[in-house]
Image (cartoon, rainbow, N blue to C red):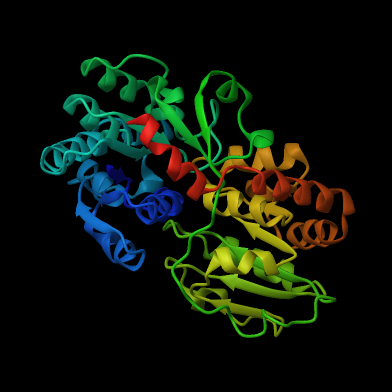
Amino acid sequence: MRMIFTSLASYGHLYPLLPLAVAARDAGHEIVFATAPEFHPTLDKAGLEPAPAGISIRQAFQEIFTGDPRSQGEVPKDELEQHIGRAFGRIMPERFMADLAPLIEQRRPDLVVYETGNPGGLFAAHTAGVPAMCHGFGRVSYNGDAASTFVEPLAAFAAELGITGDTRLAWGRPYLDICPPSVQEPQFLAGARRVPVRPVGWSEPGDLPSGVLGRDRGRPLVYLTLGTTPMSQAHLLASAVHGLAALEADVLVATGPSVDVAALGDVPSNVRLEAWVPQSELLPHVDLVVHHGGSGTTMSAFSAGVPQLVLPQGADQFTNAEATTAVGAGTQLLGDEVTTEAVRDNARRLLTDSAVADVARKLAEEVAAMPSPQEVAEQLPQYA
């Protein structure tokens, strides 16, 4: 069977699809993965055939703000939300739809698998008369996140193409759901055509930092990451680093591509800074993950059975933090609550709270019981 997978050009949107795409390829299906060229090296490393499609999130916002001298911080919140709605609800879907149309014509796929942030994949498939199914990257939220800003423009765009139904439910199409049901949005669980698939972390091949394997498990290892999305976060990272350094623990920090490490100043001897780590391989070895609430890290921590201290900054991070806290798998600190002392005290509690550890372990068992990407790959022909 021939398939086209497609996602936005972002780690958090592309990585969740890779385990199923690779499993489908290994099952003998012909797979093409369409996204912006900047992520084609990642696809090459995964052994997948890349195809150019769409523009990046950064390019979409550059288009919107061309000629506007203001920085993002100077744009009023209501206006910024309108721009987000335009970027995700019209600009990127239109571009992906236009670029995928000739690829679909050339490759004649039996099925298009698009991720939930890239409905241009569905729109192109619908126009060409090709079946499509949606692939989630985490928990679906109905209130209080950035996705709320582009539901209306997306629904309007879909209606222009003759696609009706609930946008949040992928317009009634099958939805590959990697979120364990116990933390998924109940309204989504009740209405979606879910196809459960186990969340499998993906990271580019690499060695774990020295000292992780074979370390003394009597001394906790805390992992700190604020993700890969560019934002001004050095001050936040500094507060977290110094709070965690006060613990009797080893602290491993993935600084990511957008932090000026020099801005962190001198760090204590029990803190190690790394620009990048193979996160999916690392998490089973850590005792606590402190992070921004991105869907990839949240789902991976569920899979690994690791308690979480979440410091959300934007987008779906707030609802991920709320869900993690509500189920008892961790806690969250918001806005001005993120101080060195608060990070220290909450991390110390989470490292010793047996009730949180029990919940985290049960979540890992729930994830392990979900169908694997290999099992789901065998089912894909029935959706074509």
The residue located at (33%, 52%) in the rendering is: 28
**Is residue 128 depicted above or below 230 in this figure?**
above
The residue located at (61%, 29%) in the rendering is: 185
- Looking at the rendering, in which quadrant would you find the N terminus? top left
- The tally of labels here is 0
- Looking at the rendering, in which quadrant would you find the C terminus? top left
Looking at this view, is 371 or 293 the one in front? 371
User: Which quadrant of the view contains residue 82?
Assistant: top left
Q: Position of residue 291 (x, y in %)?
A: 61, 57
User: Which quadrant of the view contains residue 84?
Assistant: top left
Looking at this view, is 296 or 311 the one in front? 296
**Is residue 299 depicted above or below 97 in this figure?**
below
Residue 87 visible in the snapshot: no
Q: Quick check: 362 left or right of 105? A: right
Q: Position of residue 298 (x, y in %)?
A: 60, 50
Q: Quick check: 234 left or right of 245? A: left
Q: Quick check: 42 left or right of 359? A: left
User: Which quadrant of the view contains residue 187?
Assistant: top right
Q: Quick check: 42 left or right of 129? A: right
Q: Position of residue 195 (x, y in %)?
A: 51, 33
The residue located at (31%, 45%) in the rendering is: 5
The residue located at (37%, 45%) in the rendering is: 74
